[in-house]
Amino acid sequence: MVDGALPLGVETDADIAWRKDLLRKIGYKL
């Protein structure tokens, strides 16, 4: 999993959503 600017445990649903979208854009399948 790619870790963004936020440390683990501080992510909100929105943070998770943008991260999934980012991973999808760069070719990962979730």
Image (tube, grey):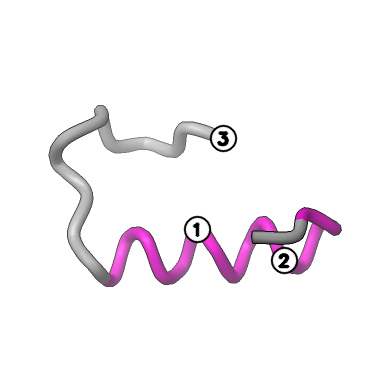
Sequence-first tag of 2 and 3: 3
Q: Is the magenta stretch mostly helix, strand or loop?
A: helix
* Label ID, residue 2: 3
Q: Can you give x and y, in whole percent of width and height, for residue 15 in the image?
A: 32, 60
- Dot 3 falls on a residue whose secondary structure is loop
Which residue is label 2 attached to? 24
Q: Is residue 3 left or right of residue 15?
A: right
Which residue is label 1 attached to? 19
Q: Can you give x and y, in whole percent of width and height, for residue 20 in the image?
A: 54, 63
Q: How many labels does the image show?
A: 3
Badge 1, how many Cα within 10 Å: few under 14, some, many 20+?
some
Q: Distance between the residues labelled 1 and 2?
A: 8 Å
* Residue type beneath disc 3: Val
Residue range highlighted in magenta: 14-28
- Dot 1 falls on a residue whose secondary structure is helix
* Residue type beneath disc 2: Arg
